[in-house]
Image (cartoon, rainbow, N blue to C red):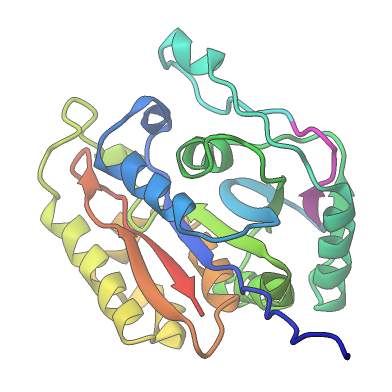
């Protein structure tokens, strides 16, 4: 008798997270609950590869390559309990070498990094989405002064890893202007300028107009929504990893502190 039919491997989803304030690490409201629901429904995940707004490198893109990546507490002036939080997923050194090779072959020079740990754009949302910290995690830096097309190329280069069960994630923010944040009131209504930019993004995503999203500076209130682009750019890593058959599914929609859009979404084949 010949072998039985092969079992198709599930293609891992891609996730964009607006990570908001580091204080979401301590929250238990609708946003962390939504991340947990996503993690519970993500299916078998072999590893997580994350691009965060909080790590940019010159010349070559760095990729964490240690077996046990430490946490980076890259925030200041927060309650002491924030600095006692722990999240200890294993690393993925062999996958890191694979990621370096794939990026370099795609024209994005990359190098393995054995020193830098996971910043709060990675570990804060993952504490909610995958709280048991069993799935290996590695972080990929943004290229300094990157264009949307360059970051999308990174997603394209790593897209085949989805078929191996690797979940690709971008962590940033759909609207991110710390000078306009209402820190006194997390539940403040969205400022009109922020809501308008967020609605523009939602419309482009619904229309799968990924090319149009690259012209984000033409969007209403773009310069106010993002005085600097680092929190916006991870969205292109996610969109670059999209498959034609993917459908966009919302993970969370809403605002914190009046101006921080927490819009998060997944792409699923």
- Relative placement, left or right, of 252 versus 239 is left
Vertically, is 157 above or below 115? below
When asked about the image quadrant of residue 88, the answer is top right
The N terminus: image quadrant: bottom right
When asked about the image quadrant of residue 142, the answer is bottom right
Vertically, is 181 above or below 15? above
- Extreme residue in the front direction: 1
**Does residue 188 appear in this view?**
yes
At which x and y percent is residue 233? 52, 62
**Does residue 215 appear in this view?**
no
| Count of numbered marks | 0
- Relative placement, left or right, of 9 versus 179 is right
- Extreme residue in the top direction: 80
Nearer to the camera, 235 or 145 = 235
Which residue is rendered at x = 58% and y = 77% of the image? 240
At which x and y percent is residue 102? 83, 71
- Relative placement, left or right, of 48 versus 247 is right
Which residue is rendered at x = 38% and y = 27% of the image? 23
When asked about the image quadrant of residue 41, the answer is bottom left
Nearer to the camera, 160 or 20 = 160
At which x and y percent is residue 34? 33, 49
At which x and y percent is residue 176? 36, 49
Tell me if residue 153 is in the magenta stretch. no
Nearer to the camera, 227 or 137 = 137
Which residue is rendered at x = 35% and y = 78% of the image? 205
- Relative placement, left or right, of 159 versus 208 is right
Vertically, is 94 above or below 160? above
Tell me if residue 64 is in the magenta stretch. yes
The region drawn magenta spans 61-69
């Amino acid at each position: 008798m010949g072998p039985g039919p092969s079992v198709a491997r599930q293609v891992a989803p891609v996730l964009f997270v607006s990570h908001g304030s580091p204080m979401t690490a301590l929250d238990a409201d609708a946003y962390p609950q939504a991340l947990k629901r996503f993690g519970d429904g993500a299916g078998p995940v072999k590893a997580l590869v994350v691009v965060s707004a909080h790590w940019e490198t010159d010349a070559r893109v760095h990729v964490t390559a240690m077996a046990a990546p430490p946490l980076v507490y890259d925030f200041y002036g927060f309650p002491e309990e924030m600095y006692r939080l722990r999240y200890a997923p294993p690393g993925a050194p062999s996958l890191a070498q694979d990621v370096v090779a794939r990026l370099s072959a795609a024209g994005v020079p990359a190098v393995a990094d054995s020193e830098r740990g996971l910043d709060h754009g990675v570990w804060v949302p993952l504490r909610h989405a995958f709280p048991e910290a069993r799935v290996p995690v590695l972080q990929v830096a943004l290229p300094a002064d990157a264009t949307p097309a360059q970051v999308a190329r990174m997603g394209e280069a790593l897209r085949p890893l989805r078929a191996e069960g690797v979940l690709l994630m971008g962590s940033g923010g759909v609207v991110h202007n710390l000078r306009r944040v209402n820190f006194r009131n997390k539940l403040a209504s969205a400022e009109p300028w922020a809501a308008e930019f967020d609605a523009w993004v939602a419309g482009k995503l619904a229309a799968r107009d990924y090319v149009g999203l690259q012209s984000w500076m033409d969007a209403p209130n773009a310069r106010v929504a993002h005085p600097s682009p680092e929190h916006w750019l991870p969205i292109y890593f996610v969109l670059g990893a999209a498959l034609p058959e993917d459908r966009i599914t919302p993970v969370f929609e809403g605002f914190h502190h009046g101006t921080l859009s927490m819009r998060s979404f997944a792409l699923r084949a």
